[in-house]
Image (cartoon, rainbow, N blue to C red):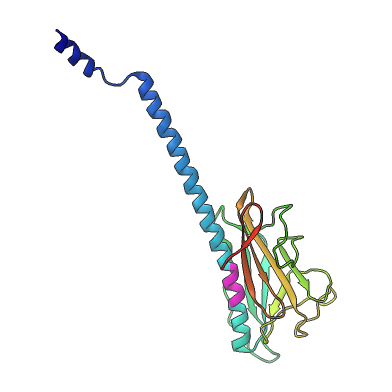
Amino acid sequence: MRVRGGKRNSEQGFSMLEVLTVIALVAVLSGMAIMATNSTGNFSRANSAMYAVISQLRTARQIALTKRRNVLISFTAPNKIQLTVETLAGEAPATAIAPAYLNDGAAGGLQFYVYPGTPDTPMGFGNSSSITFTPTTGGTSGLAVLFSTQGSLVGTTAGSGYNTVGDNNPVNASIFMAIPGQPNTARAVTVMGTTGRVRSYSWTGSSWQEEQ
């Protein structure tokens, strides 16, 4: 009799409480996995967008140096970067360069954006807006700059604190980007006007950390 009773107990299976506990545990683990995946995806998108900005800036400078022509860089919200080679009078127009977009313009990707209250980068070139260009000699800001044939980043707008095209008035630049609502995606790129040196930073939640 005891044997038969023991057999019946072993075949009863799991109780409802045990089943519900397992289901709850699976749900929690699944949620954690989804959150981790989203966080990793956003981190990857943030770095990809930052590297796209760096690539466009370095490409513009390299073209300016090798072709001996100024290269205009235009930033258009929310995520467009356009390079344009400035030809001399009488020259045929340069071949158009296709625009670049942060995260290739994908939905939910990064855009030019600076979080309110976020401090400036260690370079101190300004963070009053997501795209900040400040003449090294002082003056107001604008949205168009170019790399000169000497490799310097200079302003292009007469009357706004910059000299006109070709005058080689160096302009320091700060470009901030992020996914709104996702502070961990905040990234920044700076350019030293006189040398054209590009630096990049990621936001740690409390400070800007320079990327190597």
Residue 15 in picture, x, y percent from top left? 33, 19
Please tell me which residue is depicted at 56% across the width and 58% down the height of the picture: 46
Residue 2 in picture, x, y percent from top left? 16, 9
Count the marks: how many? 0
Q: Main secondary structure of the magenta part?
A: helix
Judge whether residue 145 can be spotted in this image. Answer: yes
Residue 205 in picture, x, y percent from top left? 63, 52
- Residue 56: in magenta span: yes
Q: Quadrant where the N terminus lies?
A: top left
Classify 99 as above or below 45: below
Q: Which quarter of the picture shows residue 82? A: bottom right
Residue 143 in picture, x, y percent from top left? 74, 69
Extreme residue in the bottom direction: 90
Q: In screen coordinates, is 204 left or right of 114? A: left
Judge whether residue 11 can be spotted in this image. Answer: no
Q: Residues in magenta?
A: 53-58
Please tell me which residue is depicted at 69% across the width and 57% down the height of the picture: 114
Q: In screen coordinates, is 27 left or right of 104? A: left
Extreme residue in the top direction: 1
Q: Quadrant where the C terminus lies?
A: bottom right
Classify 103 as above or below 38: below
Classify 205 as above or below 93: above
Q: Which quarter of the picture shows residue 67? A: bottom right
Q: In screen coordinates, is 193 left or right of 160? A: left
The residue closer to the viewer here, 206 or 167, is: 206
Please tell me which residue is depicted at 66% across the width and 83% down the height of the picture: 151
Q: Which quarter of the picture shows residue 190? A: bottom right
- Residue 199: in magenta span: no
Q: In screen coordinates, is 31 left or right of 151? A: left
The residue closer to the viewer here, 106 or 113, is: 113
